């Protein structure tokens, strides 16, 4: 027997970690009743500061995320971490190395870690992240860190769920142009050059500053560029202080957020329709027959899709 | 005045390069009448061999793709290249370095290059690639090479449009585990260790073979691992010969392709519905009002999406 939603929701609101883990899983799985559960917790959300941490593979994002989390906990803040793992399109799960950090409950008091795969998230990665953030928020997390490999489009989408975005670079990866290619510069509120104890850190800082100058428009201030090192501890404390300040300054949704909210509603509508199409049509006999006619060269996919939608409309 | 679709289609079938470039652009833009144009060219498609080339940034994929294309042209084959560029989620276009290779018409006879952005492709990246491949096919291209940075989920989706997938590795990137993370191993039909003139190429070959052994199931033969070098020319000719063989052996769609075709029909249906939602709802007054109520804390996105879909159903 599954735990009733109302018990899970009550558990989450009381700060029960097991209820938190369970509710996230069931919301991710879109278990029957998920939407009503989200409606119930929604009024208890909106105060959490969501901090996106992205950058090329090998930039030391996981270690940096952990250091930031520990710094925040030391100052009395409750922290949630969402680790987004690029995952296999076929197995639908994370592989090897990723499994190691896949743990629902971190061993440090005040930190809750959750992995999310880029695939297999039924509600889509960005909406999935929004849902998980809200559950962590209702649980009482003050700050949620989302760590993602900033290379694919999907992962860039995730950081849209963040209030503030940090882009991590590192000396020696030669990723200057690659970062640019992925369009990450434009979504960054803050840059960090990590592993600053290594040679070449200052060059990376200059490179980023030069690129920022090129892309700067008007009077807008350029995002700050910090240096950090997990080895020497350089820069971590200033980063944590900045985050704490942002958290304290955060306001509830304003008219400025209308576009973001509209986008979420449209996404939720699309997902519902998508689900409808997949469940209703995938096993449909008329569609199967039409696919066979495409294989036999008698029809084409474009006409078949049109005909099937026509049937849908007639059925009302 | 836009050129009529029938003139474009006729031009493409006659092998007119300008018509090819124009038709691709208009199909990508989903210009009015696009679907009927695709229906017309569909019967002339299916013979092209689609070869996906993916791998980490910096693996030398572009150079390798060009070498393969030239090798094929030398042997008398007509080649199309689709270069998929990770693009900015905000500008919707490719940046800096990417612009350099963005050219609709390559200077070499028999090669046509086209860039596709991971974003801004209205039909979605995978369907967009399928459409472009078909137009190139109808034009008379024997082989289409799709080059993509194999890190994001979107880019992995693109190679689903390919008949054969090549994964490029390179010594010194330390990307063994990264390749695995992105789930690329499982979609590869062929591995290439590029820049084989560099130190460490043999180690990368062994690493890949070891990983393949680990993941091998049953009696299935492991995908071959080749070494190539653009500098010495090593391996390029054998790669080209393999491709030519695959092209000559290619058969028209069979019953085995039913899943892929079904997926395409469902995708086309979903896109039509999404388009409907976006155009019908984005400027909708009731939805705008509901968004404002969400901002004021009176409603939540989940309930609003539900209500709006309810209205949609009632309208029939």
Image (cartoon, coloured by chain):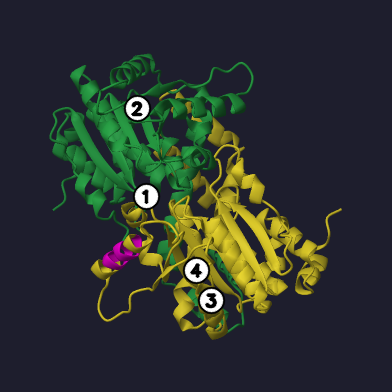
Chain colours: A green, B yellow
Q: Position of residue B109 (x, y in %)?
A: 74, 68
- Name the residue that disc number 1 marks: A118
Query: Few, some or many C-alpha atoms within 10 Å of disc 2 (few <14, some 14-19, many ≥20)?
Result: many
Using the rendered image, report if marks 3 and 4 lie on a common chain: yes
Give how far apart the Cα atoms at labels 1 and 3 are.
32 Å
Is B166 rendered above or below residue B63? below
Q: Residue at x 53, y 67 (%)?
A: B233
| The disc label shown at residue B243, or none | 3
Q: Is residue B205 magenta?
A: yes
Give how far apart the Cα atoms at labels 3 and 2 are.
46 Å
Is B233 rendered above or below residue B218? above
Q: Residue at x 34, y 35 (%)?
A: A146
Contact between labelled residues 1 and 2, with CB atoms less than 8 Å apart: no
* Local SS, label 4: loop
Residue sticking out furthest to the right: B1
| The disc label shown at residue B234, or none | 4
> The magenta stretch spans which residues?
B204-211
Q: Is residue B227 left or right of residue A215?
A: left
């Amino acid at each position: 027997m599954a735990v009733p939603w109302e018990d899970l929701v009550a558990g989450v609101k009381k700060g029960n970690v097991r209820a938190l883990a369970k509710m996230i899983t069931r919301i991710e799985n879109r278990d029957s009743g998920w939407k009503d559960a989200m409606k119930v917790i929604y009024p208890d959300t909106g105060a959490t500061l969501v901090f996106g941490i992205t950058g090329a593979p090998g930039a030391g994002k996981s270690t940096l995320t952990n250091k930031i989390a520990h710094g925040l906990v030391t100052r009395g803040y409750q922290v949630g971490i969402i680790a987004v793992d690029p995952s296999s399109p076929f197995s639908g799960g994370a592989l090897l190395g990723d499994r190691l950090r896949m743990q629902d409950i971190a061993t440090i008091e005040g930190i809750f870690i959750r992995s999310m795969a880029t695939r297999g998230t039924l509600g889509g990665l960005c909406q999935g992240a929004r849902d998980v953030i809200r559950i962590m928020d209702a649980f009482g997390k003050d700050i949620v860190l989302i760590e993602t490999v900033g290379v694919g489009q999907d992962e860039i989408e995730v950081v849209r769920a963040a209030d503030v975005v940090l882009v991590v670079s590192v000396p020696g990866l030669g990723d200057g142009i690659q970062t640019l290619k992925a369009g990450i510069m434009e979504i960054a509120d803050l840059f960090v050059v990590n592993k600053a104890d290594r040679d070449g850190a200052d060059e990376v800082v200059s490179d980023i500053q030069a690129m920022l100058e090129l892309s700067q428009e008007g009077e807008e201030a350029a995002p700050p560029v910090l240096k950090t090192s997990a080895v020497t501890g350089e820069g971590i404390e200033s980063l944590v202080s900045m985050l704490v300040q942002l958290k304290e300054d955060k306001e509830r949704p304003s008219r400025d957020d209308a576009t973001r909210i509209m986008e979420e509603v449209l996404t939720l509508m699309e997902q519902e329709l998508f689900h409808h199409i997949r469940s209703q049509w995938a096993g449909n006999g008329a569609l199967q027959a039409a696919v066979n006619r495409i294989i036999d060269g008698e029809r084409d996919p474009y006409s078949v899709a049109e005909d099937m939608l026509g049937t849908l409309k007639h059925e009302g």
